[in-house]
Structures are given as structure tokens and as C-alpha cells.
Image (cartoon, rainbow, N blue to C red):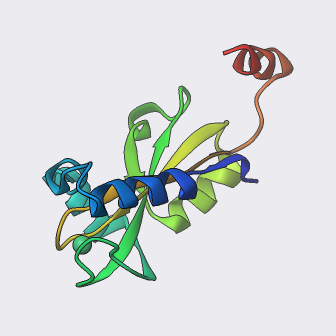
Amino acid sequence: MHRQIVDFALARRECLSRVRTGRTSLASVCDADTYLVRAAKFHGKQTDEVCPICRKEQVTLVSWIFGEHLGRMHGSARSVAEIQELDATAREFTVHVVEVCRTCRWNYLVQSYVAGLPGGVARRRRRVAE
Ligand SMILES: [Zn+2]
């Protein structure tokens, strides 16, 4: 169950408009490091959307998972299938979906959501207060 979905489409559009008008440099948005580019290659989900910067390839979506109960998987990139499995078996965790172009290294956080089995009420309350 995906919940608390936050979509960053608007912020992404604003970022791209800043790049087009030169207020944001290409170097600052096309800065995916080797680790992220590799994650895109091995765990990424190919999309139909052409890279908004170089238009040379379709962007890949990479999902990073974060959660105090994930152990060594905390902070790692995971495939859609792996996340589906964790969603049904693991305690609550957060997913950050990053759009990556492997050609020009454009990358942007496009969505975040919470998945996995809901924790106890106390934990949920604490999260709300954060
Ligand atoms: Zn590109």
C-alpha cells in the first residue's frame, strides 16, 4: 500500500524553467554520481519520457528505500519487484523515486511515498509530530 504520496512535478517544472533561462546551471542539475547512474542501470525502471535536458534517451526511475527496520537495505536502490515484495512483508519504509538520465546525468527527486506494513499507533503518532 503506497501512502503519503508526495509528487514533485511542480518543483521539477520550476527547476527546468530555471535551467532554460540560465538561472540554474546545467552542472548543478546534471550531477548524478557514478553510484546513481549504476543504480539506474541495474535497478531502474525505464520510462517513455525523454530526458528534459539532453533529449537523447528516456529517463530511468530509481527507487531508494529508507527505513529503520530495513537493516542493510536502508538507503539502497531497489527494483519495482523488490519494492512490491517489501511492501507486503516489511515494516513501514519510505521510498524516494529519482528520475535519472544516464547520458547527461540529469537527476531529480520526482516522488516520495511510504510503503510497507503500517507500524504501531505510537510510531504513527510520532511520525505525524515530526
Ligand atoms: Zn539527459
Q: Which of the four quarters of the rendered structure image does ligand 1 lie in?
A: bottom left
Residue in view at x 58 percent, y 40 percent: 94
Number of numbered discs visible in the structure rendering: 0
Residue in view at x 53 percent, y 32 percent: 67
Q: In the figure, 11 relative to 82: above or below?
A: above
Where is residue 60? Give x, y as percent: 37, 71
Where is residue 122? Give x, y as percent: 81, 14
Is residue 26 found left or right of 91 in the rendered image? left
Rendered image quadrant of residue 45: bottom left
Where is residue 130? Give x, y as percent: 66, 15
Is residue 130 found left or right of 51 in the rendered image? right
Where is residue 56? Give x, y as percent: 23, 84
Residue in view at x 37 percent, y 60 percent: 16
Residue in view at x 53 percent, y 26 percent: 68
Q: In the figure, 104 relative to 109: above or below?
A: below
Q: In the figure, 26 relative to 73: above or below?
A: below
- Give the residue at the far front of this rendering: 21
Closest to the observer: 82 or 46?
46
